[in-house]
Amino acid sequence: MKKRVQKSKYTTIMLIPDSTQKIKSLQIPNWIWHPMWICICVLIIALLTSSLRISTYQVQVNGFGQELKNRIELNSTLKSQNQLFDHELQKLQMQYNELEQKLDVLEKYKEQLDEKLEQTAPTSKKHSSQAIQSSRSSFLVIKNNLPSKNFLENSTALSIHFTQLDDLITKELKAYQALSQRIDKALPYLSAYPTGWPAQGKITSEMAIRKNPFTGRGRELHTGIDIAVSHGTEVLATGEGVILFSGYQGSYGRLIIIDHGFGFTTRYAHNSSLLVKEGDFVKRGDVIAKSGSSGRSTGPHLHYEVRIHDEPQNPRDYLGEETP
């Protein structure tokens, strides 16, 4: 029978430094190798796990870094857009303010022209500018819609529209200035031009060839119109001028003649009292007499004439609107 070989309980490790030194031996018990290998395996596993976690963390950190970079770029882009938005808004606001100022100037011109026209022709209707109204309307629509969500996309279109409005207002303003200058030159004529009703009442006799109202025979030219009024009704000058005559004159009775210049004269006859004297300066609408039935008259009324170079004209052409 073979003899069983007994396993050694130790593992001998020999250390040979060099030829000058003694050989050293180290005996390690065999039982220690099992936990050592287990520790080594555990350590290897731990190192591998840590390495995997570190790699995962590194990926996450890289992802966070990229996201942070993207957010920084996005923030920079938004900041640039906000700066552009503010710039465009300030630009449009300046255009808006300039248009507002021009519209105010234009409306003041319009009011001044209306006042001049009202003074020269009180019976005429006021004329308003469609350009002002349409510009103001369009302008308020833009103002109410500004800024909108798509402001940056529409800012160019709004700026172009503002420029078009500015051109329109500028042209209208020049037209008003030119018209104002023409009115100023024509103002003396317009102020003197006889227009409007000299008294409130109803026309009872037109300018025409008619039968003699007293005899009923023969025909004669009635050189003016007769306006039926109550005794003592105010008689108004129909244009600016100088009193050429104020007194009693035959069939006219108490008569006032106004010289308006430019060849125009007006006559107001059959008054009960005269409130102005020769040489007085009167304006349109001034009270110059009180109506009556003096001279050749069948009852209280005002006889009114308009003449050009002493040639009788039809007063109907100068009355304008109907009497109130």
Image (cartoon, rainbow, N blue to C red):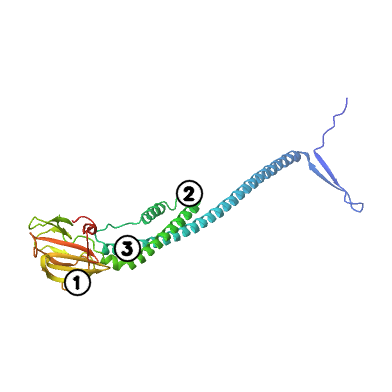
Q: Quadrant of residue 209?
A: bottom left
Q: Quadrant of the C terminus?
A: bottom left
Q: For mark 3, give the secondary structure.
A: helix
Label 3 vs 1, first from the N-terminus: 3
Q: CA distance from mark 3 to mark 1?
A: 31 Å
In this image, 74 relative to 118: left or right? right
The residue that label 1 is drawn on is 244
Residue 266: horizontal and vertical position, in percent?
Answer: 20, 65
Left/right placement of residue 197 relative to residue 63 reads: left
**CA gap, disc 2 to disc 1?**
72 Å
Residue denoted by label 3:
113
**Residue at the (23%, 59%) spot, across then down:** 318
Residue at the far bottom: name it: 279
Q: Amino acid at mark 2?
A: Asn
Residue matched to label 2: 150
The answer to which of 226 and 156 lies nearer the viewer is 226
Tag 2 and tag 1, C-beta contact below 8 Å:
no
> Given this view, does label 3 or label 1 mark the residue nearer the observer?
1
Q: Nearer the viewer, mark 2 or mark 3?
A: 3
